[in-house]
Image (cartoon, coloured by chain):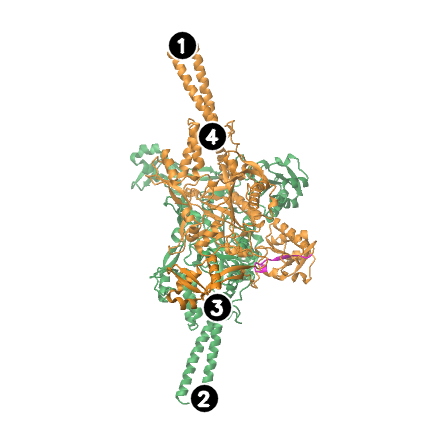
Chain colours: A orange, B green
Amino acid sequence: MRILISLVSSSTSTGLHLLSVSRRLHTKISPFSTLIGLKPPPAMATSEDSLRRSLAEKQSSIESQGNTVRALKAANAEKATVDEAIEKLNALKLDKSVMEKQLQAAVNGNGPDGSINKEAFRQAVVNTLERRLFYIPSFKIYRGVAGLYDYGPPGCAVKSNVLSFWRQHFVLEENMLEVDCPCVTPEAVLKASGHVDKFTDLMVKDEKTGTCYRADHLLKDFCNEKIQKDLSISAEKAAELKHVLAMLDDLSAEELGAKIKEYGITAPDTKNPLSDPYPFNLMFQTSIGPSGLSPGYMRPETAQGIFVNFKDLYYYNGNKLPFAAAQIGQAFRNEISPRQGLLRVREFTLAEIEHFVDPEYKSHPKYSEVADLEFLMFPREQQISAQSAKKIQLGEAVSKGIVNNETLGYFIGRVYLFLTRLGIDKDRLRFRQHLANEMAHYAADCWDAEIESSYGWIECVGIADRSAYDLHAHTEKSGVPLVAHEKFSEPKEVEKLVIAPVKKELGLAFKGNQKKVVEALEAMNEKEALDMKASLETKGVVEFYVCTLGENVSIKKNMVSISKEKKKEHQRTFTPSLNVFRFPPLVAPIKCTVFPLVQNQQYENVAKIISKSLTDAGISHKIDITGTSIGKRYARTDELGVPFAITVDSISSVTIRERDSKDQIRVDVEEAAPVMKSVTDGHRTWADVWASFPHHSSGSAED
Amino acid sequence: MRILISLVSSSTSTGLHLLSVSRRLHTKISPFSTLIGLKPPPAMATSEDSLRRSLAEKQSSIESQGNTVRALKAANAEKATVDEAIEKLNALKLDKSVMEKQLQAAVNGNGPDGSINKEAFRQAVVNTLERRLFYIPSFKIYRGVAGLYDYGPPGCAVKSNVLSFWRQHFVLEENMLEVDCPCVTPEAVLKASGHVDKFTDLMVKDEKTGTCYRADHLLKDFCNEKIQKDLSISAEKAAELKHVLAMLDDLSAEELGAKIKEYGITAPDTKNPLSDPYPFNLMFQTSIGPSGLSPGYMRPETAQGIFVNFKDLYYYNGNKLPFAAAQIGQAFRNEISPRQGLLRVREFTLAEIEHFVDPEYKSHPKYSEVADLEFLMFPREQQISAQSAKKIQLGEAVSKGIVNNETLGYFIGRVYLFLTRLGIDKDRLRFRQHLANEMAHYAADCWDAEIESSYGWIECVGIADRSAYDLHAHTEKSGVPLVAHEKFSEPKEVEKLVIAPVKKELGLAFKGNQKKVVEALEAMNEKEALDMKASLETKGVVEFYVCTLGENVSIKKNMVSISKEKKKEHQRTFTPSLNVFRFPPLVAPIKCTVFPLVQNQQYENVAKIISKSLTDAGISHKIDITGTSIGKRYARTDELGVPFAITVDSISSVTIRERDSKDQIRVDVEEAAPVMKSVTDGHRTWADVWASFPHHSSGSAED
């Protein structure tokens, strides 16, 4: 299982208000190895570099002492002298052998006492996980397929627990809008997002057999092998190889090819020469429908399904920002060479969040709930100056500008809470800021949460400010503007320039050239138009250059009307039908509404307390503290089939109304959530509840 | 959303015990239209057939009366006489027009009062569902893709509610083994299952433009159009068209092609002639890995992932039958022409169950819980004799043999409870038995649960006895025997025939022919071998025909040993490692174990009561009432990271032990489930519980 929680806050520009910042939190939870209590041994403190240097010195001492011994023997020196020299040589050789063991231990990650290494530790865990069917190589009776795994019963249970906690911790807690889109995706969508052209890895082929390898993996394996197995390489060579490893993700096809040639790397199985690296698209391709003419792909991420629905989701949210949309589903990547067990697989479950914000308002109402958290952070500056991660209080990181803003900080904090509550050891969890060269050109800032596993520090959360990149891309390709209009509490008037050529007059004056003149007039920018307006008002006529005609024409006052018009912002209006869906409480998408009967600070507070306890109990609900009449507030949710309504009409007790019978009971404030829980999870029926609580017969809450 | 719950009970033969029956329950829940409270108007009782006959009679009366009028006019009859005849003609025409309206209403499914028809009803529901984002045509900013839909926030919530109820009602309640397999499937698996060769629909192409159509849809549309719009067709013609509609699924490519030609059906858009029907495979094809040499498909159902894991799941279940495996996941079908909204789509979520049983034991321990249920059943016999579905008590249906056995009956009852608890109207739900020609050749009996929707009665549950078809197919293709060995409470000895040719003696006697003689001896069946053994014991020598030599040879007593050997049944032994996974309660796949401290009927009853209340509270657990020591019982589940153990050591209270601290508390029996609920859903910590209950310090429960 791999889980990704990606959170993009993004919104785009309109004529009214420029909204152009977006950010993206992106979380991968690495699989079971990070979730379990068994701990791999701590990493060695001994410096590998100094060991290599000492070993090289020791080797030259041995050679020199060997020469001494040979010289003494050649000179027929006294036996005692020769023996002493030999003894010294043997002592040096013993030292060297101890050092080699230390170095081997250091590069393997073994403890100084020679305890179990990471590789052996992982193997022990993997054996148990496979034997108890946490996971199973898929289709193993057919010899399996690399990079595809099944979850057996305990694996499914863990996955289901993690996903339902994800829904509780993020979707329900933050009132996110969940969507569920198909995996099969038409080419146009993934062309716009850039995946068709750029979602590639570099591949090399065995020039004789045609076997494919991932180019960076071959280089990586070569470097690691050299560092770990060849104890004779110099500290300088080791440093060079480590530098190549560090730069691996940034190498171009040409640079990768050059390194492969330089190191003489050949095909691992045959030792044949390799082709130059070339890009291989990682998407599984297919064809939609029977014609064979509609190419499609299995989605490589779930985010695009959210972006293409931006307009509808924004509308669903009452045309208000900010809001977040979330999706859990399968993603597919046709990896060239899957590896690292469940970490790099060809199909996995993703859980992504895209959070759309107005860049003018980056504060977050619940920020204070996470500001006191303190955990390992690894800012860009510490990385560049070769320091290590250190504990920082989140609030301090935000106030010092290490983390850019409150919203970003809030989600970092929430991800920290999510991961630690799942059982991730907080000493093996750090938030690392991306270096400038790691980010896409449109991204402003990125943070990765990384978990230390037996494979080292593995990225599991990415927090990226993506600006409005994705929405812009789909707007451009689909022709449908994916933009957010600011919601004004009062309808707002805006001024708009209107150039209205009077075609009749222009036709009389310019005959066959009328069209070109009209187009030139309409193409004026605001300044040109206002200048013309001023001139026409004062002089009545103006000379105007029409470039498609290559000449000036005379425009008279009656030929064009230029004005700035006031326009009210119009929004898509919401007209409920009279349909009431009679979902049983078990099925209903939203279990209840919470309304104060009248606008009143005390009632609103009670409504918020009840809302919080409903969230804690995992009950989906809508709270509406607008002053709209109760009847209208009912109508807004009737179409969603909400079975219960809680109306706050006192500070100690509230009424609960059942949709179909319209019966109402009265319960104490603190009983509201438990009663809702029992009737929505099926442990009590409305009839049970009706028999247990006082009835509320007043029509007051009915409006 | 489409949900399939398919339940296959299946197991296969071993040398020990023949297990060869399987059955398959297969459930599709049709989408929102069946889940909502709004009801379409009831179907018309008026007979369409009799209306057509009356209309035809009326028409001939009109023609005859028209002739009368013309004759009277031609004969210059008296005006009063002519007027009277005309008046009669007009009255007949008026009657006809009333009848036409009645017939139109009948074929449209309108109420006799002309109330809203099914089509209009559906449109109203669909409009609301789309406007409130229950669902959205996928990729609609790119003009969408037929047969792909997104779920918006309320749709996701409904889907998630239904799936979690499915998990509670089936997986948890029945202790099913859930698995989660990839969608990407290599060709070999789907070749074995028959999908590569047979998962097809018949397609025709516009001979000029190449546009594709599903052949049966064109024929269906033609027939429906004719029946609904052409009021002039005879009752006989209408009956013929209805017969074609009823037979649609059974028509071969040739028969379909012949009907299309007979009715002169052309391409709907162009009226061009159509090609002959030919099969189109409905699987989305792709390629796995970078070589392009490994074809794969997106799975069309989730069941195959369960079948290929049969061996491991059987082992996981302690090598015992019966057991059920379940899977929820995406399935993909590249429909030629998707239609009927969410009913026939190209990608959907499936929830399938395969129940593997020993055919010798078809009783079910919980059968009595459903035997009293009474609901609409539509047995084969009623269908053939043109009766309608009737209410039958499930227990009666099983005892009369209408439903084949208790296990089948139990799952029919569970499906009935599942659907009605989701809100399906029981008057619009019926269980229909398959006719003999509807079933696959290997299936013994099938029942469909059908829901009446605005599209008519739609299949939503299939209960099919598939025998061991799927397991046999994968056994044959993979070479891995997917068989169940009966589990004996005591290790059991079985007798096995052993024919051991003595190669040395045979070599001396037959030289170069030795190999052929050996093979012939080994190929003897049990009777032949025992006859030879008897002869050798009495006579010491026997004549034996070796067909590969074409002659008799003399076999002496010292040349072959024939015996019946006793063999102990051997099972894969389960050796737990010493790994203990420290999953937090939130994540742990199994939250607690329930053990009676010693074997004792009273303690076992208490353990079962606690187990039931844990199931009701949705807490996954294992109950172990074997006499094995507590220590061993702990060891069995330690590898699964179970955080709590409930030990029954009295009939009024029990101990709860926490895995990591090994601390134990004592709680009353009825408090056990609520305490477990609060600590596993995170509302209390172990420390909270530790502070609230008496501590249990005796080592007695530690073994």
How far apart are labels 1 and 4 at the CA level? 43 Å
Kindly identify which residue carries mark 3. B108
* Residue B170 in the image: above or below residue B428: above
The mark lying in front, picked from 1 and 3, is 1
Q: Residue at x 48, y 33 (%)?
A: A119
The mark lying in front, picked from 2 and 4, is 4
Q: Is residue B681 left or right of residue A240?
A: right
Identify the amino acid type marked 3: Asn
How far apart are labels 1 and 2 at the CA level? 159 Å
* Residue range highlighted in magenta: A636-649
Asked whether B136 or B662 is in front, the reply is B136
Q: Residue at x 38, y 45 (%)?
A: B294
Local SS, label 4: helix
How far apart are labels 3 and 2 at the CA level? 41 Å
Q: Please tell me if label 1 and label 3 are on a single chain.
A: no
Q: Which mark is residue A77?
A: 1
Q: Given contact means CB atoms under 8 Å apart, are the residues at marks 3 and 4 in contact?
A: no
Q: Residue at x 67, y 63 (%)?
A: A699
Kindly identify which residue carries mark 2. B81
Kindly identify which residue carries mark 4. A107
Q: Can residue B157 be seen in this snapshot?
A: yes
Identify the amino acid type marked 2: Thr
The local crowd at label 1, few if under 14, some if 14 to 19, many if 20 or more residues have their Cα within 10 Å, is: few
